[in-house]
Image: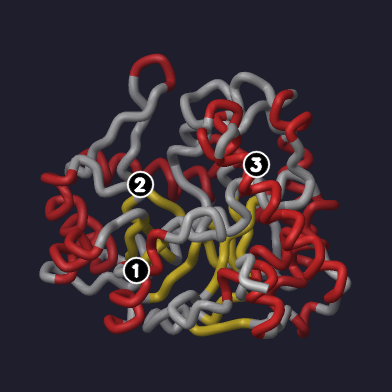
Amino acid sequence: MEQTHLKTTQLGTTGLEITRIGFGAWALGGAAYDWGWGAQDDADSIAAIHHALELGVNWIDTAAQYGFGHSEEVVGRALAGLAERPYVFTKGGQPEGPGRTTVQSLQRDSIRREIEGSLSRLGVAAIDLYQIHWPIPDEEIEEGWSTLAELKEEGLVRHIGVSNFDVGQLRRAQEIAPVETLQPPYSLVAREVEDAILPFAEREGIGVIVYSPMGSGLLSGAMTRERIASLPEDDWRKHSERFQDPQLSEHLALVERLKSVAERLETTPGAVAVAWTLRNSAVDSAIVGFRRPDQVDPILGAANLELSGDDMATIEGRA
């Protein structure tokens, strides 16, 4: 795939021109904390980042919480020495607590400590997009969002956004400073944001990058009952309802429908699942997690896939 062929779009009103697929670095945080994906080889992670950039991907999304800094460190190592670096998006609000568990804090001092750590690990002078990771605790949203607005004024971050906020929380933040971007979960197995959140973002001109467009690998086409059973105990998916019956049977039937469309389009089920999210007019781009270089190529095609009405009907079980 030539670099020039990867479609780009404007991210809301930020002025950032981003590829329609971005590199998600959650799994690069590795294991040994409460939201890990199991062990991960850092050399694989760095190779995957470099391969995605070679193919034209121009942004990476990470968070301080992913391995409590480990994902950011790996991203920083991958970016060191590059002639041209991609946009770097990260998140705060979930510092490390006792026993490598996640604490929720949107207090000013806590966020300021987190941003210093993120800037240092990523090796950048300013973060292109800084996001509140979760709106928890709810009563600290105003303090947290005011702090992000300060960071932007000081030039430590270029743009500010939120992740996992509902409409009421978005409105509260908007009263303090414009919310430039929203990062919600969105996929064929998690469509809740279609009702109110995506329409609100579109009306308000808030840029939307969706996460887990393949349902955390469930819709990749590679996930089977056997593979789920053999996931390591420290992979959070092993214990998720979405990966167990009765939900699992429905999801595997959906994957079969994705496979039939993928065959017709000469692509992969995962790429079709991602392209389905990009069909929503509110969605600017999708984050896809890659753990090895060979995982990148099959999914990047989603940025340019055009799904027909017939394809959509097949995928959604209406055909």
Name the residue beneath numbered marker 2. 92
Question: If you read the primary sequence from the N terminus, does the residue marked by circle 1 or circle 2 appear first?
Answer: 2
Name the residue beneath numbered marker 3. 249
| Disc 2 element | strand
What quarter of the picture does the C terminus occupy?
A: bottom right
Total marks in image: 3
Q: Of the numbered discs in the image, which one, if any, rests on residue 36?
A: none
| Disc 1 element | loop
Q: Residue 62: image x %, image y %? A: 52, 50
Q: Mark 3 and mark 2: span between their CA atoms?
A: 36 Å
**Nearer to me, 20 or 218:** 218
Does residue 85 show up? no
Q: Is residue 193 above or below residue 20?
A: above
Q: Is residue 54 left or right of residue 198?
A: right
Residue, far front: 319
Task: Look at label 1 and name its amino acid.
Answer: Asp
Q: Mark 1 and mark 2: span between their CA atoms?
A: 27 Å
**Nearer to me, 236 or 308:** 308
Seen at 43% across and 46% down, the residue is 118
Q: Quadrant of residue 155?
A: bottom left
Task: Look at label 3 and name its amino acid.
Answer: Ser
Q: Residue 105: image x %, image y %? A: 24, 38
Name the residue beneath numbered marker 1. 195
**Nearer to me, 97 or 219:** 219
